[in-house]
C-alpha cells in the first residue's frame, strides 16, 4: 500500500511539473450580432496540429507549450477568425464571430481543420442545425425539430402524424428528451402532428444514438438534447409568424447590454378558429410558452433561468368528451470557472407531466387525471488537463413522484366513485467519471463509468399475490407497508462506457463504441403507437430495471475539403428485462396492474449509411438504414420470438435545400420505409351469436410500405435589405403525390360500398386508416 501511494505521488508531482511548462488559453465564443454563445466552434492551432471545440455553454480551454501561435476559430455559417496569441502565461480570450460566410462555389477550397465527423471520438451522434432545418418542407407550415430527428439514420418514426420515434430497436419511452436539461415526458402537440419545440427559440439540438457520454443516464436508446437561445444582449428584437396550424411571437432584448438578456416566446394553435368557422362541435387547441433570463456576472460566473409550459386540449361531441395533457419545466443553471482548466455547471431542474380524460354524462361521467413530477440537482465538471487529456465527472440526484390515476365523478348521479390509486416515490442517483485521452496522433480513447443507484421509496403499500403472473384471477394474500423515506427496493448498476477513434489519414477514421444504459422508469402503454394517455411506473417490487448493452463500429470520411461528410455504422443492442404486457391485458383502471407486467429479452441490430453536404448552394443529406428488432417475453405471443412493432427493415431518407439566389430557396424531402408490423386477427371464434377475433401472432402482419415526397419554397423579398423589419414567405407542399400511407388497421363487420352489412353479419374485413393526403400550406414570418 505504501509503495502504491509513493508511485501515485511521484506520478502526480511529475504531471504537475510537466503542466507548469505549459499555459492555457480559454474563453467564450459568441455571435457578434446577438451575443449568443456558440456551441461546437472549432479552436485549432495549426503549428501543433491540435485543437478543441466549445462545449454546450460556448466555453473552450486548450493547454499548450509556451509560445506564439496563430489560433483559428471556425464555425459553419460564420466567417473564420485567425488570431495571433503570445502565450507566456495563462490567457483568457473571448471571441465574437460574425459576418455570415459567403456561399462557397463547389470548387473553392478553404483551409480549416477537419470537423468532428472525422476527428471526434464521439460516434452515433447527429447535430441538427436549426437554420438548415428551417429550409426544409413542413407539415402545416410548422417547422418541427422532431420531424427532422425522425429522418436521421437509425431513427424510426412511430407513424405519420406522431412525434414519437424509435432508435436502434428501442421503444419510444426509451428516449430521454431534454429542453435546457429538463426532461419532457411527452413531446407532442395535437397527438403528435407537431412537437412541443418552437423552432424560434432553439439554438441547437443533438441526438445521441450510441456511445452515449457518461453524464447521461436513465434511458436505454437515445438522448435528444435541445438547447434554447439565450436572447439578444445587444438590441431589441421581435420574431413572429402565422401559418396554417399555429401563430407565434418571440421577444428578445438586453436587460443590461452585453451582460444580461431575456427571451419570451408564445405559440398557439389556429385549428380552433377553423373548426369554429366550420361550425363543428369539436375543439382542438394547444399552446406553449418559453421564457429565459441570463446574466453574466463576470467571466467566471454566468447564471441562467429558463422555463417551458405547454398544454393541449381536445374536446368532441359538443364538449361531452375531453382530453388534456401538458408539460412544464423550470431550469436554474450556474456556470462557474474555478480556474483556467476547471469548468463547472450546476443545475436545479423541475419537471412535471400530467394528463386528463373526461366524459361529461349525468350517469357515466367521470374525470380521470394522472401526473409525474420530479426535482433534480446536478453538478457536472470538466477538467481540461491538457490538449490531449480531458476529464468529466459529476453527481446527479432526482426525486420523482408518480401519481398513476385519480378518478372523480363529475355529477352526483354518476355511477363512479372517487378512486385514488396509490402514489409511488423514487430517488435516482447517478455518479460518473470519464476521461478522453489522445494516446497517439492517430489514436484517441474515451473511457467512462456511471454508477446508477435507484431507490423505490415509501410511503407506500406493496400487495403480495398468490401468483403475481395470474392476471385472470389476481389473489392478494398479504401486504407490506412502508413509511415515508423507507426504502422498498434498491437497485445498483454499473454502466461502463467506451469510445475509440483511430485516424487512418487526415480525412478518414474508424470508431468503436460500447455503452451500457439502465432505465428505471417504465411506460405503461396500451397500444402500438404511444399516446399521451399512458402511465409511468418506477422499478420496484415487481419491476426490474431495464438494461441495454450496445456496441457499434463505424467508418467516417470527409471529401472535398470537408464539403461532404460520409459515414457507415453497424450496431448490435441487447436488452434485458424489457417490459411488455401479457396478451389481452387489462391496463386502464386496473389496481392489480402488476399482475399484467411481463419482462423478457429484446435485441436489435442494423447498418446505417449517411452522406451530408454542409456547404455550397446545394446542401442536404441522404441516408439508408437496414435494421431488425426482436423480442421474446414469457406470456407474450405464447412465449415465442416476435418482431417489435417498430421493426422496419429498410428506411431511406433524402432531403435537400437549394439557394437559387438571395431571394429564393427551394427544399425537398423524400422518405421510404418498410411497413410497420401490427397485430391483426387471423380468424374468429363462434359462440352462438358472439364472434370474437382470434389473434394467433403478435405483430404477425405488416402494413404496406410508407413513402412520401414533400416540397417547399422560401421567399425573402429583396426589399428586406432596405428596411429594419424583414418578412419571409414559406410555401410547403406535403405529400405531393397524395400517397395513402396506412396509419393503422382495424377489423369490422364486412360492409358494401353503401355501408350496409353483407350477409348474416358474421363476416369481417380489415380496414386501413389514412391520415394526410396532399396538403399545401403557407406561413408568413416577420423579424425586426
Image: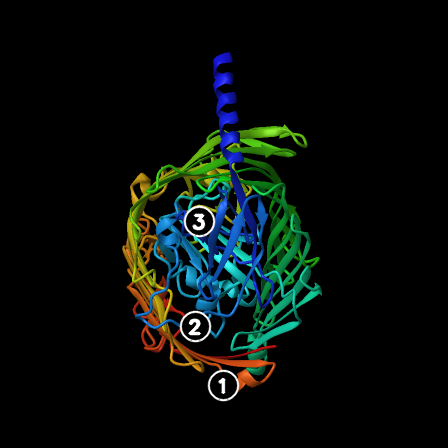
Residue at x-position 36% and y-position 69%: 619
Q: CA distance from mark 3 to mark 1?
A: 40 Å
Tell me which label, 1 or 2, sits earlier in the chain. Answer: 2
Which of the two residues, 143 or 511, is positioned nearer the viewer here?
Answer: 511
| Residue pointed to by mark 2 | 102
Residue at x-position 48% and y-position 75%: 141
Determine whether, in the image, residue 679 is placed left or right of residue 495: left
Considering every residue shown, the one lying at the far top of the view is: 2
Q: Which of label 3 and label 1 is nearer to you?
A: 3
Determine whether, in the image, residue 322 is placed left or right of residue 696: right
Image quarter in which the C terminus is found: bottom right
Which of the two residues, 207 or 106, is positioned nearer the viewer here?
Answer: 106
Q: For residue 51, which numbered disc appears in the image?
A: 3
Q: Quick one: label 1, few (<14), some, or many (20+) residues within 10 Å?
A: few
SS at mark 3?
strand
SS at mark 2?
loop
Which of the two residues, 724 or 495, is positioned nearer the viewer here?
Answer: 724
Tell me which label, 3 or 2, sits earlier in the chain. Answer: 3
How far across and how far down the image is residue 766, in percent?
32, 64
How far across and how far down the image is residue 292, in percent?
65, 59
| Residue pointed to by mark 1 | 718
Amino acid at each position: 500500500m505504501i509503495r502504491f501511494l509513493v508511485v501515485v505521488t511521484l506520478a502526480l508531482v511529475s504531471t504537475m511539473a510537466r503542466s507548469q511548462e505549459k499555459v492555457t488559453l480559454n474563453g467564450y465564443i459568441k455571435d457578434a450580432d446577438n451575443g449568443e454563445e456558440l456551441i461546437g466552434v472549432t479552436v485549432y492551432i495549426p503549428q501543433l496540429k491540435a485543437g478543441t471545440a466549445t462545449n454546450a455553454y460556448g466555453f473552450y480551454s486548450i493547454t499548450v507549450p509556451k509560445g506564439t501561435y496563430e489560433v483559428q476559430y471556425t464555425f459553419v455559417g460564420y466567417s473564420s477568425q485567425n488570431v495571433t496569441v503570445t502565450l507566456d502565461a495563462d490567457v483568457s480570450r473571448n471571441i465574437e464571430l460574425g459576418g455570415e460566410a459567403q456561399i462557397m462555389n463547389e470548387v473553392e477550397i478553404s483551409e480549416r481543420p477537419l470537423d468532428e465527423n472525422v476527428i471526434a471520438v464521439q460516434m452515433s451522434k447527429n447535430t441538427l442545425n436549426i437554420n438548415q432545418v428551417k429550409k426544409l418542407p413542413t407539415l402545416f407550415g410548422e417547422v418541427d425539430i422532431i420531424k427532422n430527428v425522425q429522418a436521421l439514420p437509425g431513427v424510426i418514426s412511430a407513424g405519420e402524424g406522431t412525434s414519437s420515434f424509435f432508435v436502434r430497436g428501442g421503444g419510444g419511452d426509451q428516449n430521454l428528451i431534454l429542453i435546457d436539461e429538463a426532461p419532457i415526458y411527452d413531446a407532442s402537440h395535437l397527438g403528435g402532428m407537431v412537437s412541443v419545440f418552437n423552432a424560434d427559440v432553439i439554438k441547437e439540438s443533438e441526438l445521441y444514438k450510441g456511445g452515449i457520454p457518461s453524464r447521461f443516464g436513465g434511458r436505454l436508446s437515445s438522448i435528444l438534447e435541445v438547447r434554447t437561445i439565450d436572447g439578444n444582449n445587444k438590441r431589441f428584437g421581435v420574431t413572429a409568424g402565422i401559418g396554417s396550424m399555429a401563430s407565434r411571437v418571440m421577444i428578445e432584448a438586453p436587460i443590461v447590454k452585453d451582460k444580461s438578456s431575456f427571451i419570451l416566446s408564445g405559440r398557439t394553435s389556429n385549428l380552433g378558429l377553423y373548426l369554429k368557422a366550420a361550425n363543428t362541435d369539436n375543439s382542438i387547441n394547444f399552446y406553449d410558452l418559453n421564457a429565459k433570463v441570463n446574466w453574466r456576472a463576470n467571466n467566471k460566473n454566468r447564471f441562467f433561468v429558463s422555463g417551458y409550459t405547454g398544454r393541449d386540449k381536445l374536446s368532441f361531441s359538443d364538449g361531452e368528451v375531453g382530453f388534456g395533457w401538458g408539460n412544464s419545466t423550470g431550469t436554474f443553471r450556474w456556470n462557474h470557472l474555478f480556474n483556467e482548466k476547471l469548468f463547472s455547471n450546476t443545475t436545479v431542474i423541475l419537471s412535471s407531466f400530467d394528463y386528463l380524460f373526461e366524459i361529461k354524462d349525468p350517469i357515466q361521467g367521470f374525470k380521470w387525471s394522472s401526473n409525474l413530477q420530479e426535482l433534480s440537482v446536478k453538478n457536472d465538471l470538466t477538467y481540461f488537463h491538457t490538449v490531449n487529456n480531458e476529464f468529466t465527472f459529476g453527481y446527479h440526484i432526482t426525486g420523482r413522484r408518480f401519481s398513476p390515476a385519480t378518478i372523480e365523478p363529475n355529477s352526483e348521479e354518476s355511477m363512479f366513485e372517487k378512486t385514488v390509486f396509490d402514489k409511488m416515490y423514487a430517488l435516482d442517483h447517478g455518479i460518473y467519471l470519464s476521461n478522453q485521452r489522445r494516446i497517439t496522433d492517430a489514436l484517441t480513447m474515451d473511457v467512462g463509468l456511471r454508477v446508477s443507484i435507484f431507490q423505490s421509496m415509501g410511503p407506500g403499500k406493496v400487495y403480495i399475490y398468490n401468483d403475481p403472473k395470474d392476471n385472470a384471477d389476481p389473489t392478494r394474500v398479504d401486504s407490506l407497508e412502508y413509511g415515508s423515506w423507507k426504502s422498498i427496493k434498491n437497485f445498483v448498476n454499473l454502466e461502463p462506457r467506451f469510445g475509440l477513434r483511430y485516424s487512418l489519414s487526415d480525412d478518414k477514421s474508424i470508431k468503436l463504441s460500447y455503452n451500457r444504459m439502465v432505465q428505471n422508469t417504465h411506460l405503461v402503454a396500451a397500444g402500438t403507437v404511444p399516446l399521451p394517455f399512458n402511465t409511468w411506473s418506477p422499478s420496484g417490487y415487481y419491476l426490474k430495471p431495464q438494461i441495454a448493452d450496445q456496441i457499434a463500429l463505424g467508418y467516417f470520411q470527409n471529401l472535398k475539403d470537408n464539403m461532404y461528410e460520409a459515414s457507415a455504422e453497424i450496431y448490435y443492442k441487447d436488452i434485458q428485462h424489457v417490459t411488455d404486457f401479457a396478451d389481452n391485458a387489462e391496463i386502464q383502471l386496473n389496481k392489480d396492474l402488476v399482475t399484467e407486467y411481463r419482462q423478457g429479452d429484446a435485441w436489435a441490430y442494423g447498418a446505417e449509411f449517411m452522406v451530408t453536404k454542409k456547404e455550397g448552394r446545394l446542401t442536404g443529406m441522404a441516408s439508408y438504414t437496414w435494421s431488425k428488432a426482436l423480442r421474446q417475453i414469457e406470456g407474450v405471443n405464447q412465449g415465442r420470438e416476435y418482431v417489435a412493432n417498430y421493426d422496419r427493415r429498410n428506411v431511406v431518407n433524402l432531403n435537400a435545400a437549394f439557394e437559387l439566389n438571395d431571394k429564393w430557396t427551394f427544399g425537398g424531402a423524400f422518405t421510404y420505409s418498410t411497413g410497420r408490423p401490427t397485430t391483426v386477427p387471423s380468424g374468429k371464434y363462434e359462440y352462438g351469436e358472439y364472434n370474437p377475433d382470434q389473434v394467433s401472432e403478435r405483430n404477425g402482419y405488416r402494413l404496406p410500405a410508407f413513402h412520401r415526397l414533400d416540397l417547399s419554397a422560401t421567399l425573402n423579398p429583396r426589399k428586406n435589405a432596405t428596411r429594419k423589419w424583414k418578412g419571409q414567405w414559406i410555401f410547403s407542399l406535403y405529400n405531393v403525390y397524395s400517397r395513402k400511407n396506412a396509419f393503422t388497421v382495424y377489423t369490422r363487420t364486412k360492409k358494401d360500398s353503401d355501408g350496409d352489412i353483407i350477409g348474416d353479419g358474421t363476416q369481417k374485413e380489415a380496414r386501413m386508416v389514412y391520415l394526410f393526403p396532399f396538403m399545401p400550406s403557407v406561413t408568413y414570418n416577420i423579424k425586426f
